[in-house]
Image (cartoon, rainbow, N blue to C red):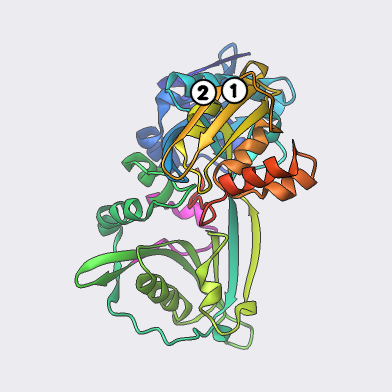
């Protein structure tokens, strides 16, 4: 098997393999949008002779991290044909991807996992969580009446293309969020083929404006339902709600919770500390569940640790074990604080010992040191673990807003 970039005349076959694994037919719309907006220079296919038996690629991304930002290769559309499973194709693609990330001078890789059991063995760690909401609109009342100082208006897709990217970039300040280029917007956000809606409406776009300036946006879908007795039982699904301030946040949630003929509102990939739960009279009526979301793989440990900031100043020697890439194992002396950070290889005695995937889970501030230590995944003195916890926490949990 050979892993290499996919050439233009091989893309149809590559699409067929991709569609078989993700259980959907490759529509002409999908092929057209993918052909225009996918980073084909970072594509990869697993080939047996001229036959494609595996697919993959990467987005060029820049992630917010605590106090800074880091470039990353966003691993995506990973599949292996059912005819060639368990023959090393995935491992070969991961190694190819890591070489590609290094060639792009990116210190880390990132992904969303379709199956959460796969990527830990390659050194990826769970770095963010996502909250999923479901609400009965008749049971949700705000503690304080929503009296926005601006107004909400619907916009069409062409207007959304002009307004949304700027708003999103202004809001991209929380660890785990990443910048979206024009191709990412078209491929992952604006593409809306009827065959992929699952019975839902096309995307609706709404913006909240104050003094003629947009302060937030809402992307949502609707689904009409009626009971046998003739009562409406409609649903709305919030695909994305991004705001610059509390006024816009309250107004847009109030808007979607009061849509006509809508009984249930659901949302996914929301921040784990969703403020809405603290704004309503009966938070139990917001039914929540959570799941792991973004996974990170730190490939250049010193570069990643130097890129972020630490609310508690301190010095620690971390012994990082990397089973998949043993040459990247080592001890690293981290000296960091709110203003700067330095990390260098060292031969000094380790204060904390951990594996690379657990360091990735700590990196954005989501994982709890005490929980990882209790689970046997971190080793160190109580004093060292307390310092590790104080240094790696952040004032807000990370949030990755979209799947890629």
Residue 392 in the image: x percent, y percent?
A: 57, 45
Residue furthest out toward the top: 49
Say what secondary structure mark 2 lies in: strand
Is 236 left or right of 316, judged from the image as shown? left
Quarter of the figure with residue 154: bottom left
Residue 34 in the image: x percent, y percent?
A: 42, 36
Magenta region, residue range: 190-206
Residue under the point 69% across and 33% down:
351
Comparing 319 with 277, the one in front is 319
Dot 2 alpha-carbon crowd within 10 angstroms: few under 14, some 14 to 19, many 20 or more: many
Q: Which mark is residue 93?
A: 1
Question: Gap between marks 2 and 1, in whole Å?
Answer: 8 Å
Picture layout, residue 14 above or below residue 205: above
Mark with earlier residue (2, 1): 2
Q: Is residue 23 visible?
A: no
Q: Is residue 38 visible?
A: yes
Quarter of the figure with residue 3: top right
Tags 2 and 1 in contact by the CB under 8 Å rule?
A: yes
Comparing 156 with 319, the one in front is 319
Dot 1 alpha-carbon crowd within 10 angstroms: few under 14, some 14 to 19, many 20 or more: many
Q: Which residue is mark 2?
A: 44
Comparing 182 with 323, the one in front is 323
Q: Give the position of the N terminus as an image quadrant.
A: top right
Picture layout, residue 209 above or below residue 366: below
Residue furthest out toward the left: 212
Residue 110 in the image: x percent, y percent?
A: 53, 36
């Amino acid at each position: 098997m050979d892993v290499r970039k996919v050439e233009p005349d091989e893309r149809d076959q590559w699409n067929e393999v991709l569609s078989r694994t993700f259980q959907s037919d490759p529509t002409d719309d999908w092929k057209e949008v993918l052909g225009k907006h996918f980073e084909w220079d970072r594509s990869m296919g697993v080939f047996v002779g001229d036959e494609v038996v595996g697919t993959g690629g990467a987005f060029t991304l820049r992630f917010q991290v605590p106090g800074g930002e880091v470039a990353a290769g966003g691993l995506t559309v990973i599949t292996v044909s059912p005819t060639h499973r368990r023959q090393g194709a995935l491992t070969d693609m991961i190694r190819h991807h890591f070489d590609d990330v290094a060639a792009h001078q990116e210190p880390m890789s990132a992904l969303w996992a379709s199956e959460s059991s796969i990527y830990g063995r390659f050194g990826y760690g769970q770095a963010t969580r996502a909250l999923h909401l479901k609400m009965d609109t008749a049971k949700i009342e705000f503690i304080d009446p929503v009296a926005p100082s601006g107004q909400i208006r619907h916009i069409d897709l062409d207007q959304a293309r002009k307004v949304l990217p700027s708003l999103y970039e202004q809001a991209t300040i929380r660890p785990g969020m990443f910048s979206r280029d024009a191709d990412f917007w078209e491929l992952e956000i604006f593409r809306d083929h009827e065959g992929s809606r699952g019975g839902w409406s096309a995307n609706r776009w709404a913006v909240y404006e104050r003094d003629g300036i947009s302060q937030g946006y809402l992307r949502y879908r609707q689904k009409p339902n009626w009971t046998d007795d003739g009562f409406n039982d409609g649903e709305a699904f919030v695909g994305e709600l991004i705001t610059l301030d509390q006024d816009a946040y309250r107004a847009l949630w109030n808007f979607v919770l009061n849509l006509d003929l809508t009984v249930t509102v659901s949302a996914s990939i929301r921040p784990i500390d969703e403020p809405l739960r603290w704004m309503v009279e009966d938070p139990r009526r917001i039914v929540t569940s959570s799941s792991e979301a973004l996974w990170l793989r730190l490939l250049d440990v010193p570069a990643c640790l130097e890129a972020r900031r630490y609310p508690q100043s301190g010095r620690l020697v971390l012994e990082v074990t990397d089973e998949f890439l043993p040459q990247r194992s080592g001890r690293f002396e981290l000296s960091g604080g709110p203003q700067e950070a330095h990390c260098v290889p060292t031969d000094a005695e380790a204060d904390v010992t951990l594996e690379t995937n657990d360091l990735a889970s700590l990196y954005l501030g989501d994982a709890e040191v005490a929980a990882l230590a209790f689970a046997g995944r971190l080793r160190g003195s109580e004093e060292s673990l307390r310092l590790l916890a104080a240094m790696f926490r952040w004032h807000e949990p990370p949030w990755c807003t979209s799947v890629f």
